[in-house]
Amino acid sequence: MEAVKLSGKAKSIGVSNYLAAQLKATLEGATSPPVINQIEYHPYLQHADLLALHKQHKIATSAYGPLTAITKARPGPVDEIYSRLAGKYKVTEGEIALRWCIDQDILPITTSSKEARMKEYLDVASFFLEPDEMQEIAEAGRQKHHRGFWGDKFDADDRS
């Protein structure tokens, strides 16, 4: 990938699903480190150590599956919090989930085939979560572990 970047065919290098060990190995040998790592991220899979490594090396974090707590992991400890905050801010629970990522400087990626839902997600820019609300979601999320993707590649209790 570094050769592709040097040739001018790419402006930067990004990686996906790199865990801390893989990222450290890449950084040791890279002349052009990755600028972004796309990982599964939501309250039930928070990757604290990996996010710290990203910040240390100025690597952006992109989150796929940011809606997992809503779409794949119900019931769960964040359900009531998402519902309450959606009512407070007059948005959907999905927008709360996206905002929780954004307010941590994590770039959420989601998909929808519904135009109305895509428009709805634009409302995520109309509010911010309070620091205590961010903390409440994080703490509740740590009470449950759920991997929405690649579950067959990890041990059931692996939170890496």
Image: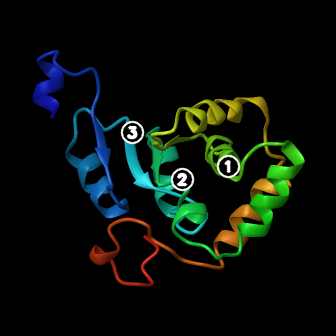
Q: Residues within 10 Å of mark 3 (few under 14, many from 20)?
A: some
Considering depth in this image, is 75 or 15 the residue closer to the camera?
75
Residue 149 left/right relative to 55: left
Q: Residue at x 54, y 62 (%)?
A: 71
**Amino acid type, residue under disc 3 in the picture:** Ile
Considering the numbered disc 3 on the image, is that residue within a helix, a strand or a loop?
strand
- The answer to whether the residue labelled 2 contacts the one labelled 3, judged by CB atoms less than 8 Å apart, is no
Q: Quadrant of the C terminus?
A: bottom left
Q: Residue at x 65, y 70 (%)?
A: 141
Residue underneath mark 3: 36
Q: Is residue 159 above or below residue 94?
A: below
Q: Residue at x 66, y 75 (%)?
A: 76
The quarter holding residue 25 reads bottom left
**Amino acid type, residue under disc 1 in the picture:** Trp
Q: Quadrant of the N terminus?
A: top left
Q: Earlier in the sequence, mark 3 or mark 1?
A: 3
Considering depth in this image, is 156 or 4 the residue closer to the camera?
156
Q: Is residue 111 above or below residue 115?
A: below
Residue 7 left/right relative to 119: left
Q: Earlier in the sequence, mark 2 or mark 1?
A: 2
Residue underneath mark 2: 66
Q: Earlier in the sequence, mark 2 or mark 3?
A: 3
Residue underneath mark 1: 100
Q: Position of residue 133 (x, y in %)?
A: 82, 55
Considering the numbered disc 1 on the image, is that residue within a helix, a strand or a loop?
helix
